[in-house]
């Protein structure tokens, strides 16, 4: 209990939660109204009514709360009037500051509509308990919110306001809003990225183009937006991976919702980062090349190493230099951002290496990836690529061959099993004779030799039986399907698709004097041999644009025996 002669001078403090204002049970205005009623009813002496604070109490550093504690320390007020103890603090530092002010006698009491905390041991204990409960409540909410945000991100939905080119779907409730395409800005953003990828424009040039010609503005928000984009905004736009279909949440990579279109692909994104030099995002993942594990040096049979080159041709002195970690031309010192129409180059070069320092000792065996791929395409076009119609015919006929082959293989397997049964019966008979008869040491030795011979025969039969492959046609079926699509995969497929194709065909590449030789697995080479033979027998056979590949077609029918032999 406070003493009768103690005069309490209050300071009224209001704070709203950091949650959405529309979801508040008690906003600042509600708190003020309720406290004003109690003030009039109890004739409280409130000297300062602090302005409402919207900053979260989860961590220290609130400016209005800081003014409140200074007023208590200065002796201007000695009491606090709040709607609830949790309005004052949800963190141990601010809570400790108030308890300390009570301990030194500068804060006499804290009054709320439901109770009053006086400056005594029991009330300070209860106040500390209420502060701890507030802290626990905030911690629990933090866990729930973090879990919800992480779950949203893993579903491909970035948190916060949408990026330029997209907009938040206002039909959904706040906190659960998906992104939708901004029909006005998305095509304009696409144009900017495509121009950047040509390597003919600097960022300042693209900023001028976006502002003056495209009239591109920032996304409209409730209180801001709709303004011409700045140069720094353009840099932010090009650095943001969201336009390539991925983003990061707490250092975890997340893929953007597949229903949203990509402005560029990931390889194009990393190409732009290389163009931006120091102002771009450094690639954290290992750069991938397609052919380094499939290519050997034709001179020493050593491995090859991919060298990723990102270069700029200076628009002033026309010198070529690497732009990684550089902001200006090393020859004339012209800044990259100030260059007019610079040319950006990016390519992969494969070198022969046979020591740990990656030093090339085999001359003329380096080759650019585009030339390597061109040679591979030529090989596939001449030896492997077939039409979808021929692919279907091959698969249909491989099953006919399979059925015949299967009968033969099953007959062989049955014969092996019969022999195996006969040998096991003979072995059993010998074992019984040894046990039931009184035999000499010499006979015992003969029996052992016969047993070992039979066991050897059984082992041989087991190996032969296991080598019988009755499912070889599955691999052939996959190959024929792939042959109809191989050119499109090499020309337009992803790195992973290209690698899988090389693995499927067992393709190995050898480079000597910048000439590429391609070696495929035995079954593919055998098919290629008979395919070329069929084409030589009839020039009209298998034109790539023809659909005339049925048995009734003369050109096709004439080479069927050759293909079936293959």
Image (cartoon, rainbow, N blue to C red):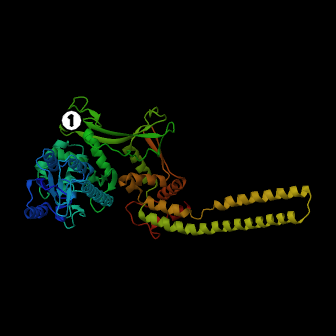
Residue at the outermost top position: 331
The N terminus lies in which quarter of the figure?
bottom left
Residue at the outermost front position: 4
For the residue pair 235 and 413, the one nearer the viewer reads as 235
Question: Do we see residue 539 in this rendering?
Answer: no
Q: Is 278 placed left or right of 364 in the picture?
A: left
How many dots with numbers? 1
Question: Do we see residue 526 in this rendering?
Answer: yes
322 to 136, vertically: above or below: above
Q: Is 139 placed left or right of 291 in the picture?
A: left
Please identify the quarter of the rendering in which residue 226 is found.
bottom left
Q: Dot 1 lies on which element? A: loop
- Residue lying at 69% horizontally and 60% vertically, measured from the top left: 462
**Image coords of residue 477 (percent x, y):** 49, 63
550 to 187, vertically: above or below: below
Residue at the outermost bottom position: 552
Q: Residues within 10 Å of mark 1 (few under 14, many from 20)?
A: some
Please identify the quarter of the rendering in which residue 208 is found.
top left
**Image coords of residue 526 (percent x, y):** 53, 55
Residue placed under numbered mark 1 in the picture:
315
- Residue lying at 47% horizontally and 61% vertically, measured from the top left: 480
**Image coords of residue 282 (percent x, y):** 31, 42
The C terminus lies in which quarter of the figure?
bottom right
For the residue pair 474 and 298, the one nearer the viewer reads as 474
**Image coords of residue 311 (percent x, y):** 29, 38
Q: Is 533 placed left or right of 30 in the picture?
A: right
Please identify the quarter of the rendering in which residue 133 is found.
bottom left
For the residue pair 530 and 276, the one nearer the viewer reads as 276
For the residue pair 383 and 33, the one nearer the viewer reads as 33
436 to 279, vertically: above or below: below
């Amino acid at each position: 209990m406070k003493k009768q002669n103690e005069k309490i001078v209050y300071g009224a403090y209001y704070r709203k939660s950091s949650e959405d204002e529309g979801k508040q049970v008690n906003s600042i205005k509600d708190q003020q109204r309720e406290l004003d009623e109690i003030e009039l009813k109890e004739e409280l002496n409130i000297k300062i009514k602090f302005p409402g604070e919207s900053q979260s109490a989860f961590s220290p550093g609130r400016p209005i709360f800081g003014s409140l504690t200074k007023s208590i320390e200065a002796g201007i007020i000695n009491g606090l009037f709040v709607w609830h103890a949790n309005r004052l603090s949800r963190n141990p530092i601010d809570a400790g500051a108030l308890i300390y002010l009570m301990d030194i006698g500068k804060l006499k009491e804290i009054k709320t509509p439901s109770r009053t905390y006086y400056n005594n041991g029991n009330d300070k204990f209860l106040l500390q308990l209420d502060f701890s409960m507030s802290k626990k409540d905030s911690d629990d909410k933090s866990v729930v919110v973090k879990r919800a945000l992480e779950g949203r991100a893993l579903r491909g939905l970035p948190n916060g306001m949408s990026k330029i080119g997209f907009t938040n779907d206002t039909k959904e409730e706040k906190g659960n809003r998906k992104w939708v395409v901004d029909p006005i800005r998305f095509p304009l953003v696409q144009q900017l990225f495509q121009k950047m990828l040509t390597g003919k424009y600097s960022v300042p040039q693209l900023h001028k183009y976006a502002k003056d010609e495209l009239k591109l503005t920032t996304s409209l928000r409730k209180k801001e937006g709709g303004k011409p984009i700045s140069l720094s905004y353009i840099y932010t736009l090009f650095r943001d991976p969201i336009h390539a279909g991925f983003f990061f949440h707490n250092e975890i990579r997340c893929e953007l919702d597949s229903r949203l279109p990509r402005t560029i692909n990931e390889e194009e994104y990393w190409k732009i980062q290389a163009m931006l030099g120091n102002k771009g995002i450094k690639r954290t993942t290992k750069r991938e090349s397609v052919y380094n594990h499939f290519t050997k040096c034709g001179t020493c049979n050593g491995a090859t190493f991919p060298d990723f080159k990102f270069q700029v041709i200076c628009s002033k002195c026309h010198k070529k230099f690497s732009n990684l970690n550089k902001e200006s031309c090393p020859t004339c010192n012209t800044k990259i951002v100030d260059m007019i129409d610079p040319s950006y180059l990016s390519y992969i070069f494969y070198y022969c290496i046979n020591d740990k320092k990656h030093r090339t000792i085999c001359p003329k065996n380096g080759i650019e990836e585009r030339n390597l791929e061109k040679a591979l395409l030529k090989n596939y076009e001449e030896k492997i690529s077939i039409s979808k119609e021929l692919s279907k015919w091959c698969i249909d006929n491989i099953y006919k061959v399979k059925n015949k082959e299967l009968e033969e293989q099953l007959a062989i397997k049955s014969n092996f099993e019969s022999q195996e049964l006969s040998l096991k019966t003979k072995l059993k008979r010998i074992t019984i004779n040894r046990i039931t008869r009184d035999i000499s040491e010499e006979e015992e030795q003969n029996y052992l030799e016969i047993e070992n011979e039979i066991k050897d025969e059984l082992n041989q039969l087991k190996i032969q039986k296991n080598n019988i492959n009755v499912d070889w046609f599955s691999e052939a079926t996959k190959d024929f399907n792939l042959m109809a699509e191989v050119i499109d995969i090499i020309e337009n497929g992803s790195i992973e698709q290209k690698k899988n194709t090389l693995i499927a065909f067992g393709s190995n590449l050898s480079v000597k004097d910048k000439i590429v030789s391609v070696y495929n697995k035995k079954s593919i080479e055998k098919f290629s041999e008979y395919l070329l033979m069929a084409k030589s027998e009839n020039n009209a056979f298998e034109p790539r644009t023809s659909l005339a590949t049925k048995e009734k077609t003369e050109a096709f029918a004439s080479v069927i025996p050759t293909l079936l032999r293959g």
